[in-house]
């Protein structure tokens, strides 16, 4: 393979730039040409493609977001657009593609793969919601950002003796809430994997109050099936505690990637390029324990993420 393409797609994640740097520099080291596709699948359809040199990815390792920009493309879901994308890739002489993104981006990649272009998926999403890999690029940074914010919120929550609901990202996967909640000492963690009733949260907060706890921190993933507003309203009503909500939103998606995310990005992205160089079929690259793995792309997308019940139980016990 002589010429490969690379794109970032879906929600940006800290470490995507580190992955891009590894793609470009591994590719050049293997005597390949690397073309960057801007704005994900949208940019592919619009032919926003240009060659990336060694220096194009200088000074980006420490930057959050993605210098290639990203997008969520509705157009690309249509068959005729996927056919067009293949024609565009062929026009540019691109023989294989690295897609840095999450589940939706990998599904897009699978369509291209079925049409004859080998695709390597590099897991870039803060959600940590891909079944085939232990971790995704951006998750560690997001959790640490949330953890710092929980500590700040704890200061004010204790001072005012309030209950505070902290909403974090995660539509289908509660990993950000679980990891940051456990390590941030949340009194209650609400995640999509464990259905809970607002009444249970109220009972727990009341129990804490009766045991002499002056304040309460509840970490809630956005994918939980009742709203944060409803929770705040009910908590105030039932517990009599002044209650506030903080929706952390995009703050947790930005920022300089941690060492762990930069390392995961560098290892998986470099592996992706070496797999293309070796003419491999499409794969999703990830990590299992301390081993970098390459799983058949279609099979990887079928794998369900195992839920860490022990971690949840530990968080409950320690709260
Ligand atoms: O996929 C990552 C993610 O940050 C989710 O946690 C969140 O639900 C979603 O993206 C937000 O997407 P958008 O940037 O399109 O608002």
Image (cartoon, rainbow, N blue to C red):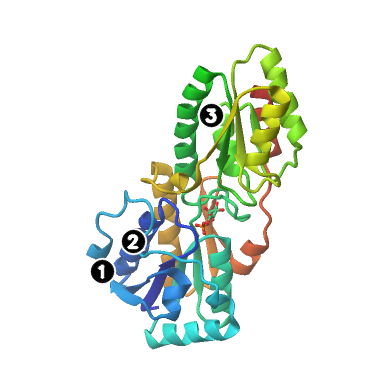
Q: Nearer the viewer, residue 308 or 189?
A: 189
User: Could you say which disc has been placed on residue 184 in the image?
Assistant: 3
* Marked residue nearer the N-terminal end (2 or 3): 2
User: Could you say which disc has been placed on residue 67 in the image?
Assistant: 2
The kind of secondary structure element at disc 1 is loop
Q: Does any portion of residue 36 appear in the rendered image?
A: yes
Q: Distance between the Cα atoms at labels 1 and 2?
A: 14 Å
Task: Describe residue 197's horizontal placement relative to residue 229 as left or right.
Answer: right
Q: Distance between the Cα atoms at labels 3 and 1?
A: 42 Å
Q: Position of residue 133 (x, y in %)?
A: 57, 53
In the depicted structure, whether residue 128 falls above or below residue 2: above
Q: Position of residue 122 (x, y in %)?
A: 48, 61
- Say whether mark 3 is within 8 Å of ligand 1: no
Tell me which corner region of the image, top left, top right, bottom left or bottom right, holds residue 141.
top left
* Marked residue nearer the N-terminal end (3 or 1): 1
User: Could you say which disc has been placed on residue 224 in the image?
Assistant: none
Q: Mark 1 = which residue?
A: 53
Nearest-to-viewer mark from 1 and 2: 2
Q: Distance between the Cα atoms at labels 2 and 3?
A: 32 Å
């Amino acid at each position: 393979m002589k010429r490969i393409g690379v794109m970032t797609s879906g929600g940006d994640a800290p470490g995507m730039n580190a992955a891009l740097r590894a793609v470009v520099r591994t590719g050049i080291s293997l005597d390949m040409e690397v073309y960057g596709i801007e704005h994900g699948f949208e940019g592919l359809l619009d032919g926003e493609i240009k060659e990336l040199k060694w220096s194009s990815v200088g000074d980006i390792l420490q930057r959050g977001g993605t210098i290639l920009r990203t997008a969520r493309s509705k157009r690309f879901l249509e068959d005729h657009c996927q056919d067009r994308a293949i024609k565009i890739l062929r026009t540019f002489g691109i023989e294989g593609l690295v897609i840095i993104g999450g589940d939706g981006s990998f599904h897009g990649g699978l369509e291209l793969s079925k049409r004859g272009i080998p695709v390597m998926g590099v897991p870039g999403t803060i959600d940590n919601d891909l079944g085939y890999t232990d971790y995704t690029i951006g998750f560690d940074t997001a959790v640490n950002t949330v953890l710092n914010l929980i500590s700040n919120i704890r200061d004010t929550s204790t001072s005012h003796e309030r209950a505070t609901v902290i909403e974090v990202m995660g539509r289908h996967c509660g990993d950000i809430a679980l990891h940051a909640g456990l390590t941030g000492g949340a009194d209650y963690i609400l995640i999509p994997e464990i259905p809970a009733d607002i009444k249970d949260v109220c009972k727990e907060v009341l129990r804490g109050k009766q045991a002499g706890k002056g304040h309460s921190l509840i970490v809630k993933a956005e994918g939980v099936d009742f709203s944060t507003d409803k929770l705040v309203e009910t908590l105030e009503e039932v517990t009599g505690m002044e209650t506030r909500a903080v929706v952390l939103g995009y703050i947790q998606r930005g920022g300089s990637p941690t060492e762990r995310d930069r390392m995961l990005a560098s290892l998986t992205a470099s592996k992706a390029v070496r797999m293309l160089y070796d003419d491999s079929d499409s794969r999703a690259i990830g990590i299992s324990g301390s081993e970098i793995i390459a799983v058949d792309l279609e099979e990887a997308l079928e794998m369900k993420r195992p839920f860490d019940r022990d971690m949840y139980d530990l968080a409950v016990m320690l709260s």
